Amino acid sequence: MKAAKATVSITRRLILTVLALEIIAAIALVGAITVHERHLQFTAFDASLRGTAESLMGAVQDAEDSGDNVMLDMRSVRLPKGSVFLVQEETGRVLGREGQLPNAVRDSASEKLEDRIDGRTYRFAILKGVRIIDPGNANKGTAHSIRVIYGMPTKRIWHEVLEAVRFFVVATLVLLSATALLLVWVIRRDLQPIHDLAHAAERITGADWNFTAPESATRTKELRPLAGALEAALSRLQQSFAQQKRFTADAAHELKTDVAIVKSSLQLLSMRMRTAEEYKAGLGRGLDDLTRLEKTVQKLLTLARLEQPDDGRSRDCSLRAALEEAMHQSKSYADLRLIHIDAIVEDDATVSLDREDAVLLCSNLLVNAIQHSTSESAVEITLVEESAIVRLSIRDHGEGISEADRQYLFDPFYRGDLSRSRKSGGTGLGLSICRAICHRIGGSIDIENHPAGGALVTVILPSHLQHGTTVFSNDVSA
Amino acid sequence: MRVLLIEDEQRLAENIATALREVGVAVDHAEDGEDGYQCGQQGVYDAIVLDLMLPGKSGQSILQDLRKRKIHTPVLILTALEGKDSIVQLLNNGADDYLSKPFDLGELLARIKALIRRAKGVSSPILTVLDVEIDTIQQTVFRDNQPIELSPTEYRILEYLAHRPRAIVSKREMLEHLYDFDWEHNSNVIEVHISNLRRKLNIIGTEPLIETLRHRGYRLREEAHR
């Protein structure tokens, strides 16, 4: 119900808007036509009133008597039905009349006016003229001032006006319906690219991410940004999906291999009866294999946790302390490989990491460096605080990295060459975990070859507190 | 029998090699693709166990290159990869069998043995030559229904000869197929074992089984002189 309420149809909106505008225009047009038609009709009406009044004036004749009197001779005058008139001399003598004229009209001085008779509206024409009887006489005839008032009901004009307007209204309605139908068809056709785009987008499934915007959509100026954005977003999604898939496959491969080792160790042991010593040694090996499986699982879980979005909890941890702890942890391994660890830690910085993650970052990098160092060489560590960032560099004196591998080294389970294969003891997750830790707080990690040989890992993290504060806390602890 | 194991995973390789050696199969182990290919292309192995994800050279390309060089050694693929497509592709590329990790060690051994048998034209695990019966699973030998006790090496020599009836097998070939790299190569060893084997098989009322062809090698007689 809610969804139906929220639905907005562009087609319906457009059609309704255009139709509303058309109707407003039609109403205005009909209004204008009405005014114009009324004006025309009234002008014609007034002309006919005047004409009839003139005829009445013409009908004033010399009365066939001895005096110079005048009379109204109605024989040559045809009057429309319902008309009223009054013809009278200045003296007040009424020469002829039809109907009862209102007094206001009779006394009016103007030439045109309207009034009501018996509830019907009449329009009047008032004509004044002079009639001269016997102008051939010596006294140049007798002049009679005549006043003609003629009126007709206006009902008929209104009827005419309404007739004309009705024709226009019907014509407009017919046109409106025709354009509405046309509009629906045109809008439907013009919105087709949207449907095409939706149809193309509908075909995307988890298995098939291929999306090419239909040509109709890319040709439409308004749709091009949407089609482009869809294509770009899908390609990004596809990439990250493929990455996830690869990660899952790699993780499965890794876990299966570890399980295969454990399983084969135990099955080998149970192939035949063995001595107690053999069982003991075999179980010990099996346990080691199991520990490796456990480590892989643990690292996978760590990576999964680090790749989750941050919970926003504020954390504080001294990078210097974390580094020192990592150095302490890996000391025995370094001693075993006769590697000297050379740390130049001038500054300290507080980074917004959990302490265990900071230690994990440092120890992963340190162990990695020790692993790839040639025997009896040194691993050099520097920790420098610059404005608002802290830079941790770890350099080993090993073989360095190959340029081809460089961009993949932080990918989970990446094993570029022999030296980085499982033989070296790593799970291929250490650097991925380091990258996840750095990215989590907006830092970066990069690996390159040192100009003088060996690999150089540089970690840049945003630091938390001011330099001075850190020095102060160091002074206190010292 | 001698098997080449190409597997980069140290512990897994150790386990497979130990298990194969315990059932009397000589094993050479290559840790990376390049090494594995170099060994495999010598064509001295009775079977190759090949991992797919290898450093150096992938299992796929090792398989392809071996088949291109007409090396027809049976190949069993060990894979931790999912998906029917890759398996179909592997079999089409000339793989003879596959097992996905984690596998059953016993099953792996049985499949390797079956591959070797089939490659030598034998389908039953029990080999019969004249009145001698060799059970390749139990690794027991009977002659005229009497059990014969053999040392592991003697058994391997007999089994290898039985797999190639009528063929002349040189001492060199025997050395190659019965011992892995770690063994001291000395052809005298073979002579000593052959002579012991002859003695043990020589039951009263039976004919000699192993023929010696001077400077050429040994052969199992298949037709009786009856």
Image (cartoon, coloured by chain):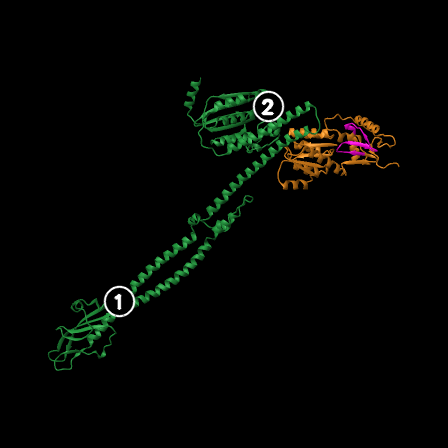
Chain colours: A green, B orange
Residue A288 position (above or below residue B129): above
Q: In this view, does A145 lie to the left or right of A364?
A: left
Question: Whole-percent x and y of residue A84?
Answer: 21, 72
Q: Which amino acid does label 1 sit on?
A: Phe
Q: Residue A4 or A109: which is nearer the viewer? A: A4
Residues at marks 2 and 1, CA–CA distance in whole angstroms: 115 Å
Q: How many labels does the image show?
A: 2
Name the disc covering residue B225, or none.
none
- SS under mark 2: loop
The stretch drawn in magenta includes residue B150:
yes
Position of residue B61 in the picture relative to residue A208 (left or right): right
Quadrant of the snapshot with the N terminus of chain B: top right
Residue occupied by mark 2: A374
Left or right for A165, reference A446: left
* Corner quadrant of residue B166: top right
Which chain does tag 2 point to?
A
Numbered badge on residue A42: 1
Q: Residue A279 appears in which quarter of the rendering?
A: top right
Is A264 colored magenta in this rendering?
no
Q: Can residue A96 be seen in this view?
A: yes
Residues shaded magenta? B133-154
Residue A8 lies left or right of residue B63; in this view the side is left
Q: Quadrant of the C terminus of chain B?
A: top right
Residue A372 in view, yes or no:
no
- Quarter of the image for residue B123 reads top right
Q: Where does the image place residue A241, in percent across and percent down from the top left?
A: 54, 39
Do the residues marked 2 and 1 share a common chain? yes
At numbered mark 1, what does the secondary structure look like: helix, strand or loop?
helix
